Structure formats: C-alpha cells, structure tokens
Image (tube, rainbow, N blue to C red):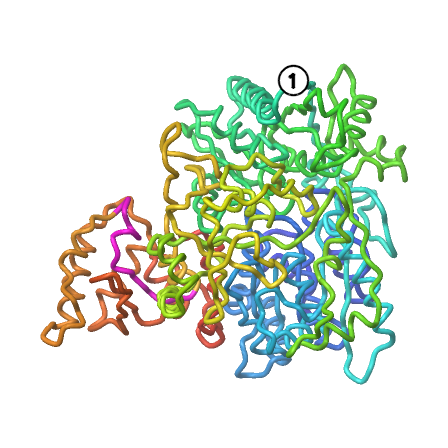
Amino acid sequence: MKATFDDFFQAVWGYAPFAWQTRLAERVVRDGWPSMLDLPTGSGKTAALDIALYHLAADRGVRAARRVVLVVDRRVVVDQVGERAARLLGALLNPAHPATSEVAAALRDLVGPDAPLLQTTVLRGATVRDDAWAHYPHVPVLAASTVDQVGSRLLFRGYGVSDGMRPVHAGLVGCDTLLLLDEVHLSQPFADVLAQLHELRGAEGAVPRRFQTVQLSATPGRRAGASFQLDANDRDPKQQPRLARRLRASKPMRMEEVKVKASADEIDKREVLAARAADHARLMLAEGRRAVAVVLNRVDSARRAWAALEDDAFERVLLTGRMRPLDQAEAVARISGRVMAGRTDALGARPLVIVATQCIEAGADFDFDGLVTECASLDAVRQRAGRLDRLGDRGSRGVILVRSDQLRGEPDAVYGAALKATWAWLKEVATDDVVDLGIESLQPHLDWLSDGIERLLAPRLAAPILLPAYLDKWVQTSPRPDADPDPSMFLHGVPSDALATLPDVQVVWRADITDQDLTAARYDADARDRLIAKLEVCRPGALEALSLTPWALKRWLGSGRATADDLADVDAQRAADDDAPDESAKTLVLAWRGRRSKVTRADELDPREGSIVVLPATTGGLGPHGTFDPEYRSAEGGPTVAVSDLGDAVQLLQRGRPVLRLDPRVYPSNLGSRFVGLLPDLREEDVDVRAALRAAMDTLRADLVPESPQWLKATVASIRSRPRPADWVNLGDGPRWAVLGTRLDAAQLRALLGMEATPQEVSDSTTEGEDGSFTAIVSQRVV
C-alpha cells in the first residue's frame, strides 16, 4: 500500500498521529499485534481502531482480522468508540484524500461490489440487537461492546440472541476477530478465560481463525506477554510536545478524612460525605474553575451530592450508569461543549458541576479543571484523575475524600480492602497531605511499588477453569442441554460470599400499561395476549432501558420499599441482603421476550436469559436527574412520580419507524390531550378512519411547543406529510390508537431531524432489519 498510516490518519482527523501510534501501526503491519498496550490515560489508545482498520486494508485480509471489537467493561457515558468508528466510515465512503481512497479501495476489493464497505455497531445490553454487522460475515466491522455482550456471544449464549442465531454470533465473534480489551483490569476474569480458550482451540485448522486478544491498560498491575509502551522520544517535549504536555501535567490532590459517627446510619454517613463533596465543589467554583467533577462510589451518594448542589449560580448534572441511554444522551448533549477535551470555553457560560459515579472512569473524554473524588482503589482513583486537565493545558486541583469509618471498619462493599490500603499508600507518598496524581509525577512511586501494587487494586474475582466439557454443552443451542453451565461466571469470575456478578436486568417503563393490566395478564391468557400485542406495536428497545442489578430490582420491587444498598457502576460488587418479599408490594412485572413474554414476580427473573422487565410508568424509580432513584416522590410522603415513556422515541431513533400512540397517558407533560377526545371509535363502519386520524394528527401538531423533543416533532411531521399512514392499530381501552408511519432509512431520518447527511447512511438502508438501530445517529445525541 502506498499510503502510510500517517497519511491515512491525517486524512481522517486533520492532524498527525502521535509518534507511538505510527510506531505501533508499523509494528502491527510488519509483525502483528502485541498482547498488551501499556499506555497512560490521555495518550490516545482509541486510535487502535484506526490502526486495526489500516492493517486490514494493507494486509488485504491475510493475517488481519475483519472484525475489531473494543470492549469496555463499564457503563460508559459517552460512546466515543461508536462516534470514532462512524467518523472512520464516513471518511472511507466519501474519501477526500488519496490515502482514504486507497484504503477504501482495498476494503472494497475484500467485500465485493454489492456489500457494505464497513459496518459500525455498538453491542449494548438491552432488548434490541444491532445486528446489521451479522448480515454480511465478510464485511469488516468496527464495534464497541461490553464484556457481557461479546463474551456471551463467544460462548454460544448471546444475551438477547435467539437460540437459532446463537451459533452464528459465536462463529462470527470467535473467528476473524480482534478483541481490544480496554482497561483490562476492569475485566481480568474475561481476559483469563480468553487465554484458556486460546489454549483449548490449539492450532489453526483449514479455516484461518485470525482471532486475537490485545489488552489495553493505563493502570499498572499484572502484565502478560509482549507489551508495547511509550519510549523516551514519546516523553520528550521537544519531540512530542502535545503528548509530553499531557504526561507532565501536574494534578495536585488534597487528602481529607471526613469524620462520621461509627454508630450512625449508613444513609446519614453518605449524607455527610455528599455534603462535604458539594462544599469542595462550591469552593472550586468560587476560585474561578469552570468545570468541576464530583465522583463518588455509589449511585445513592452521587444522588445526594447532586441534591446538595442545588444553586442558580451554576449548573449541575448527574451522570451515572443507572440511566436510560436516551436520558444520558440528552444530559451529555447539554454539557458536551463545556466538558470535552479540546474545547474552547464560551464567555458568559455558567460554571458546571458534574456529579458522577465510576461511569466516567473509562471511555469518556471529559476534561475538568477541578475534581472532588471519594477514595477508591488505586486504579479507580487514577482513572478519575485521568479526566482532570486531560490535555495538560488548563491547570487543576482536586480533593480526595474518605469517610473515617471506612478506615477503621470492615472492607468497603465496593472496593474491599483496596480502599483502605490505597488511602494509606497515598498518605505515604503525599507531601503535607497533597499527592500529585499527574502521570509522570506518580510514576516513580508506582515503580517502587512493583508487584505490591496488587493489594491496592479493585477486587477481582477468579476465572473458573474452562473445561472442554463446558464447550461441548454450550455448542448445543437448540434445544439447550439440561446441564447448561452459567456463562456469567466465565465473563466476570466465580461469585464469592462478598461479590456477585449476575448480568443486569433491563427495565423499561410504559405509560399505557397499568398494574391492573399486569394483574389481569397474570391470570388470564387473553389479557396476556392483548398486553403483548400492545407492546408489539411499540416494542421495547435498548435506548429506553435502564440497567439494574438483580438484587437492586428485587429490593425495590420485591420488598416494597426504597433501597439504600451499595449499588455502584462497577462489575463485581456486594449483593444486598435479600428482604422478605412483601405480598402487598408492586411485585408484578412483564418479563419481555416477544410473544413468549409473561407476567411474573420480580424475584423470579433470570437475568442470564437476557431478562427485560416492563413496568407501568406510575411505578416510578427515576429522579428529576434521570438516574435510578427509588426514593423520589412528588412531596414528602407523597406518591411516586411517573417515569416518562420513551417508547415512541425508540421506534424513530432506533428503528427508523415513526410511531405515535394516541394516548394521553403517553404525553401528559408536554402535550395537550384534546386529540384523544376528538377520536371517534374508529372501528365503526361509517367512520372515515383516514380523516379522523389526520384530524387528530393536526391537533397533535398544534399542541407541540418549542420545548417539545426533536424526535417527537420529527415523528409528527413524518406521519403528517404522508398521503396516509402506513398502518394504524387499536390499542384497546376505548379510542386509543397507534399510528404507524413508513419506515425511514438513515439518510431520511437525518433530514427529518434537521441533521446534515453523512455518507455512512449508504449501508444502513440495505442492512438494517426491524431489529436494527441507527447507532451513528443516536451517538450524536439527537434526542
């Protein structure tokens, strides 16, 4: 290939790559991938996607894998991997430089004239699979995934994948795939199981596997195999000024012990910590800092800090992994221009405080000038510091807080003994209780620790031994064997008395479903069929699903009371003690599996089956910040606040089909309900259905206000602009109907949303099925 990697990178991004990126690309093309990329935070590890794509084009698919999956075991706030992949695809489909033209031509030779040039996808846990990548096995793929999604597919037990498709997904993921495990310390059991799989598979057969795992890590700890690292030139400010500035940035953090009464209730202790964290954030804003992060270890603590920061002088945003993706996207869209690395601060903009959990530790390119963090394990603390003065051009200061009882009591429920050990070590290396967490500043102390660092890292579960007998069982997918090994242990480790790792349950709220509907459906088959038929019209989707641990769901719905357990955004964490179910509690949920759905109790769900639960919106469970909050009420002792219904938004943004349910319960806050009263019973023979629905749509359009969501305006406009709706369905309960518009391809959807068309839509319309999703559109946060 004539075009060098530097040429390709410059053509896509408009600036030159770092020297280490060029050096790695040359090594990969010449010798293949090393087993470890040992690179610090902020050094540009995500460019591994660019290198893998360039390698595939230069190698013509001889040794290079066609599918590249970057795996991050975190509930990532910003899907920057998906956005980067979309940018790469756009540059290839509309090449404006000889280098991108040459790479695109090489890929076209691989896939042929009729197939898509490249697929991009995000495999996230929820009800709808983005499976366009599986339609063309020979087409290159750039994907982002969690351990659960890629790991379950690899072991023939894909979460949310039908039995019939599980072998297909296993074959695609298990062959011709490069797995990039980002921040491998977050997913060490999975990495260990992958190593065992390599051993069990033995030598290459007649079909080349081209299957490899590369570990990416900015956190010291165990190292395996050949490691790629920065060299002296990378750290030389004369040779690499941009990178050296990031590495040398000073990040002073003052350490403070927050006094709490050992006998106090756990909630009171969290209130004290949250209030102190909020005080420090206010002090930093008073010093003139514009973007401050408060990062706490538990969702409950973060909610309390957010509440303590109510103030008109600055803006506050709560970001956790316990949010619906669309809510998350809306929150990030409001603040992205003020927190992303490389930004230019706008004059006159209000200062901003982001309160968050572990979800911003990996995958989020945030850049703060102030940081307040709760002490955690060393790897977590360093990851959080990686969001502080990320490019080395802002200056910063921070505070590390620890509760006094955590230094004297039992091991922490989230970080075990590592929290106390990390605090003690940081005190040793600090000067006057100030420790510099800058990359270069801390490195000498880390070198001195050597293998002793293991005691400072987050708890890790041990991977089980992968026996050939397990594989013999897993390859049986339809029907599955009676003795079916649990794949979750091989993805996250063997649960212990302290830690558990069952896959999350996905929670969806719908305003047109009531508790009475669930009760009737539990005991009456016809009522169940009607309920399923209603949901089939507006099927639950990934973008409206909230991830909860099984035990958090059970404590919330099964015990009939709010939970104050240790829910966090980490993989392995302590499960809350089960409460005895309260028969009077709202324990009935709909376990959604399409036509096989059933109404069951919350404590009967099996998350290993990809459990999705649908709840009435009146159940509550989300706060005004969009994060899981079972305590949220309209007033002290008042009723729960209904959760907004995002079902119609999902149909447009995820499936490209405009759907409107003409039901006042679905849009109670931003639309009038007059249109429902205007609808006659459309089942009567003398009713002009088309005219009645058009009149209702006109009324609905008149009720829209400037603050109405963009997707809703687009849905109404799309349906209203057509000579007739594609279909309409009666939803029962009187004159309540769903109007179904004509399915749109991605280019049409972008135009409808007022977005600039991009070349990546060329492949979307030809590969997306009804279960597909417009990942690139959603990743740009059009909500």
Residue 669 within the segment the image draws in magenta: yes
Seen in the picture, residue 405 relative to 72 is either above or below; the reply is above
Mostly what secondary structure, the magenta segment?
loop
Residue 629 can be seen, yes or no: yes
Q: Quadrant of residue 641?
A: top left
Q: Position of residue 304 (x, y in %)?
A: 52, 28
Give the residue drawn at x 31%, y 53%: 666
Horizontal side, residue 703 vs residue 426: left or right: left
Residue 263 within the segment the image draws in magenta: no
Q: Position of residue 405 (x, y in %)?
A: 71, 22
Q: What crowding class fits label 1: few (fewer than 14 Cα within 10 Å), some (14-19), or many (20 or more)?
A: some
Residue 776 can be seen, yes or no: no
Point out the stretch of residues depicted in magenta.
Answer: 655-670
The front one of 737 and 373 is 737
Give the residue drawn at x 69%, y 37%: 414
Q: Position of residue 746 (x, y in %)?
A: 41, 67
Seen in the picture, residue 326 relative to 427 is either above or below; the reply is below
Q: Quadrant of the N terminus?
A: bottom right
The amino acid sitting under disc 1 is: Val
The front one of 166 and 710 is 166
Q: Quadrant of residue 727?
A: bottom left
Seen in the picture, residue 26 relative to 581 is either above or below; the reply is below
Q: Position of residue 159 (x, y in %)?
A: 61, 64
Residue under numbered circle 1: 260
Give the residue drawn at x 57%, y 73%: 162
Horizontal side, residue 184 vs residue 288: left or right: right
The front one of 26 and 315 is 315
